[in-house]
Each structure stands twice: as structure tokens, then as C-alpha cells.
Image (tube, rainbow, N blue to C red):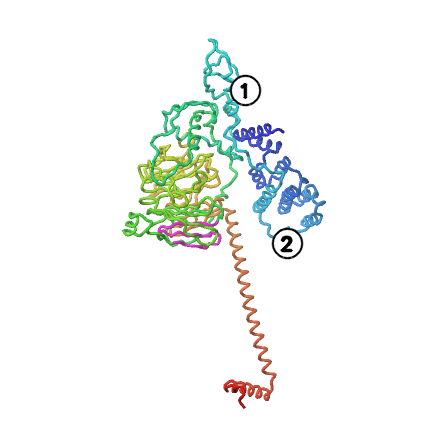
Amino acid sequence: MSSLSRELVFLILQFLDEEKFKESVHRLEQESGFFFNMKYFEEKALAGEWDEIEKYLSGFTKVDDNRYSMKIFFEIRKQKYLEALDRHDRAKAVEILVKDLKVFSTFNEELFKEITQLLTLENFRENEQLSKYGDTRSARTIMLVELKKLIEANPLFRDKLVFPSLKTSRLRTLINQSLNWQHQLCKNPRPNPDIKTLFVDHSCSPPNGARAPTPVTLPVAAVAKPATYAPLGAHAPFPPAVAAANANALAGWMMNANPSSSIQSSVVAASSLPVQPNQVSVLKHPRAPSNTLGMIDYPSSDHEQLKKRLRASQSVDEATYPVPSQQATWSLDDLPRAVACTMHQGSSVVSMDFHPFHHTLLVVGCGDGEITLWDVGLRERLVSKPFKIWDMSNCSMMLQAAIVKDSSISVSRVAWSPDGNFIGVAFTKHLIHLYTYQGSNDLCQSLEIDAHVGGVNDLAFSYPNKQLCIVTCGDDKLIRVWDLSGRKLFQFEGHEAPVYSVCPHQKENIHFIFSTAVDGKIKAWLYDNVGSRVDYDAPGLWCTTMLYSADGSRLFSCGTSKEGDSYLVEWNESEGALKRTYIGFRKKSAGVVQFDTTRNRILAAGEDNQIKFWDMDNVNMLTSTEAEGGLPSLPRLRFNKEGNLLVVTTADQGIKILANADGLRALRAIETRAYETSRASTEMKIRTCACIHLIIFIFVMCMSVFWLTFNIWSKVLLLRFLAYLWVQRQLPLPLVGEP
């Protein structure tokens, strides 16, 4: 197949993915063999859909292509065989052995015999090599890790694991350009052509004679999404397609923030039609770039792309497709509600965050300024760092005066960096601390910044321009961006009240920050010095926190009004409006309700001495738990990244770990490993002590036997000989030549 034909297949794959034709996408991937969708393969492997996996693999390789392919098919069929044995379905196991595994006997007959012998065992775990086989889910996960290594090493999959980088809706853009070109070639072009089909070339002939060619704005119906396409569930195997589904997110907020903007309609989101500069107003409050010392400008390509999207965001059919509710693939048992353990911190817990990869590693920030690193699997406090100023000489005079006046200080936020190498800590007076974590049971001081005048209310990490940065906000009404050396990159001004929280995010290659202030104002910022692009009111008009779902596709906020009414809502990003408001808060609160999200499906909030759960697609509360009691009126909470553990604060200055079935199994596995390690260490110490005692005993016995075997005269002679040696030692040695 030619290179252009191959590229056309990729364009069609992108189009099918954007239209949510999931099955068609994967059938074309398989039949063309151009792109191996690892995410789809993982989903099917974890679901145990073995026939579908082999069918999909058949588009890329066969069993006997090479040793990597043979190993891939063997691991899949072996897992299918073991699962049949684990279900005690011996008839199915025999069928798999004969039909699927027999082919490998010609390559390794001994291995095939050993696999066959598993049929004779009541439990195949009696086989020494399979003694550590766990449950089905964990076994599939382990198998999947091995399969991914084999696929990546297999030369047949080379250049097929990465989807090419394409602009959003590239096929639509090409069609749009073609129609514009056809219209410009018309002898009598109409100013507003009515294009109703793509099956034939476009032509138009106005009745009043020819007119000069003009740039054309085609109707949306020309190539926009037909209304008859049934919207399917969210599915995003290609990174460009993920961005395509959300490309107008911030642009939609900005456009709606300035209703008077004149924005020309376009046929597709990535239209190449010319638009005059005065046809779009990007800024809600234009202002001159700041010349503040220490700030730098990132390249403005993101800004230009954003303006291009704003020009095209008026297309209603392109931007306002409803998000369909997905059928639930989980149950209430998947919610972490069982109390796994309780740990005493010793001071009030203010903020918590789980490590992005080590799912039982938890950092806790306290009201006395201390931070603690816990391993909740071992129920062990790994390290504690009480608050202290690392270098007073670098602190402002205002901070030094504040510390002298009142030395008490509290943590306001702790957060892990996305790579898990850093912990950021924000304090209620001026400072932020940055610690490095390299896997040991210690945290190394990395950076101290006098970041804001007054309290630092929130801290987050972001990656603008592929550079890890720290975003902070504070009582001084400012948002600031710092690099890891402590240099200030940006300062965003515009809030009229202390800034309560920040939420950095990225849509495609557009990086931005949402911020909320204690007056309820929501603003959005690009990484430049132009000013805010959005000015909205949060429900309740007071303290609000914003969070994205794990896949970055949905935006939520939770906050409380000064009157104590709490609001948990989802935002429609394309319109900058509320999409749904969740129900379930029972009474007025004396503080701000905290919330978190997990698994792209669950919302949880702490209120009324309980933890309350919602399905993202249902405004009614799913369930709640009191976690066996002892929770404060507004418990703070945090999910780990897998969503199988949930940490909540207790009223007696401690934390509780709630878990679902998977979480409990993971914690028990950690406890078992720790117990076995401890037992092995204890046994080694016992053996060492026993050996020492045995050696001492043998030595004493030998000396006793030796002494008893001498008769009385031998003992007398021995004593006299020893006395003689002692006397000789006391006499001076004779001089040389002396008689």
C-alpha cells in the first residue's frame, strides 16, 4: 500500500474515533495492521476476552512469525487455561489444552507435559512454579506487563505502537479546503453557496450573472456531524482524539465570557478560511503585557492556536453534542467504604495526597506545620518533618516580623508532583517548601520560597512548555508560577479577593490555569502576561475548589457559601455553564466542604460527619458511610490514584484508611510480605544466637574434659612449670659475654 493510502487510513481512523465508532476503529486497526492500539488490547486482556484479543492480534502477527509472537500467544492461552482450572471447569481446560496449547508441544514438549499434568492436581497452585498465583485480576495484570514487554520488543510491531500526530479533525479540514477551492473555481460563485452533498464536485451559477470570488463561509450542514449519528460512550485511544473531544473547552468559556464578540461561523473546528483580526475578541479585559522583573514569556503558539479555535467555536453542531451517560460497569462494592486501619497523627490533619505510583504512600500536612510520610500498607510513619524556616536570611522582613509576632504556622496544602519525585508544601504564612523524594524513607530539602504576602492558600504542579513548574496562590490576590530553582516565571493579577485555589490543566497543547477566589470569582489564565480570559461566578459565591476527572475530560467544582450551603457541580466547558448540580448535602456547614474524584466515575465529599458518594452521571447521592464513627463534621478526604483506597480525617487528630475489596487485598498482601520479611529476620537472629551458644558450650566441654584427664601429679608438674615460667619472666636477662 502506498504511503498516501496508508496516511488516508490514519485519517479515517481519527475520523471514526472522533465520531465514537469504537468497533469500526478497532476493526480497521486490525484489518489494516497500521496501528496497534495498546489501550484497547489492555482493556480486553483485563476483561478476559481472549477470543477478541487473538482476533485483534491476528491483524499484526501469527503464532509462528517469531519467538516474540509465539511467547505472546502462549502467555494468553496459558492464562486462559489456568483460569479454567481455577474455575474447576476441567472440560474447558481440556479443550484449551488440545485446541490452543497443543501447537506449542512441537517447540517445547517438556513444557507441554508439565502443563498437562496440572489437570491431575486438585489445585494447580500445588505446582511449585504456580504457588504464588493469586486471584484472576492480579494474574491478568501480571500477564499484561509481560505481554507489553514482548509486544514492544517484537520487530513486527515496530512503528505501529504510536499514532501519528494529527491536528484535530484533519479529514474534515481537508474536505473543507477542497470545497473552498472548488467554490473559488466556480465561474459564477455565489456569496453564500448551498452545498448539500460531497458525492459530486461543487459548482454554482447565480441567475444575475458572475460575481467576483470571495472567501466563503459554508453552512454547517455541509460537512458537519450529521444529527443522525448516535452519540456513543467516551472512548479515546488516540491522544489527538482525546484533545479533539475537548478542543473548545477553554475557548467556550472565553467566548461566552464576552457575548458581544463577533465570531464568524466555520464549517469545521480546524477551518483554514481567512478571518479578519477584528472579527474575534480574545480577551475579556485587554491589558498591556507586564514588565515585572523576573518574568519570562513562553512561546505564544498556544495563544495563537486558542484564537484560531475561538474563530471556529460558533459551530453549534460541532460544539454542543450532549455527553451520553454510560452504562455502569461497577457496583457499590467498588467504593472504598470498609475501614482498613486507623492511624494517629497527633495533630490536626489539614491536607493529604497519595503518591501517583506507590498507591499506599501518603503525605500528610498538619495544623502545626508538620508534614508526615506514611506507608498505609505497613501502617508505619516513615518520616516526619516539623516546620522550621530553612534560611531566615532569604525571608522578607514582613515574614520575619510575622514569625516574631506569632510563631504558629499551619500547612495549607501538600501535593505530590506528577512524576512522584517532589512534594510541595504550602503554609499559612508566606512560604512554600519543596522536598525531593527518591524512594528512601527520608525527604530532602530542595527549595524554600517566600511566595506570597500572607497565607499561601493552594499549591499545584503543572507542565507548561514541558517544564515542571509550581503554581501557587495566596492572600495577596495573586497567582504565581515558579520553576524548580525558585525563579518566578509568571504573576497573574486580576482577582479582587484572596485566591482560594488553583487548578492547572491542559487541553491538547493549550496549557491554562483555573483559579477561584473567596468572593466566588472563577478566572482562567494562559501562561502569558496578558490577563484573565474568564470571569465567572462559582455557586455559593465563596470558597470553591475545582478538579478535573482523571482523564481530563470533565470539570467539577465543590464549594460552600458564607451561609453554609454547599454545592457540588459539573461544568459544561464548551459553554462555561453548569451542567448538573448534585443533591445530597443535608445541613448548613460551618466550613468549606472538601471533595475528590476517582476512576472517571465517582465523586466523594465529606459532610455531616460522613463521606458521601455520587456517580458522575447521576445527581442523586449513591450512598454514604460514617466509617465506623469518629469523623469530624467536615472530614477531609483523598483517593489514591487507583481509587481503591480513601483516606479521611478523624475528630481525634488521626486518619482512617477506607478500602474496597481490591484495596483490602493490596493492603493484606503488603502486610503479608512485611510479616514474612520480619519472620525471616527473626529466624536468622535466632539461628545466629543458637550457633554462638553451641560454640561456647563445645569449648567449655572440651576444656573440662582436658582438665579432668590429667592426674594429680600431672597437675602439680604443670603448675610448677607455669611457676617456673613466671619466675624466669621476672629475672633480668644475662648480658652477652657474662660468665
Residue nearest the viewer, comparing 90 with 66: 66
Residue at the disc numbered 2: 128
Q: Which residue is mark 1?
A: 198
Predominant secondary structure in magenta? Answer: strand
Residue 363 x, y percent position in the rendering: 43, 49
Let me know if residue 585 appears in the view: no
The disc labelled 2 sits on which kind of residue?
A: Glu
Taking the view exactly as shown, the residue that stands out farthest to the top is 208
Q: Is residue 345 visible?
A: yes
The amino acid type of the residue labelled 1 equals Leu
Q: Is residue 369 magenta?
A: yes
Element at label 2: helix
Q: Nearer the viewer, residue 599 or 330?
A: 599
- Most extreme residue toward the front is 737
Taking the magenta stretch, the answer to whether it contains residue 417 is no
Residue 136, label in figure: none
Q: Say if 75 sits above or below 722 in the image.
A: above
Side (left or right) of 44 relative to 283 = right
Q: Is residue 166 above or below residue 109?
A: above
Q: Residue furthest bottom?
A: 739
- In percent of width and height, residue 653 lies at 38, 52
Instruction: State which region is magenta.
Output: 360-385
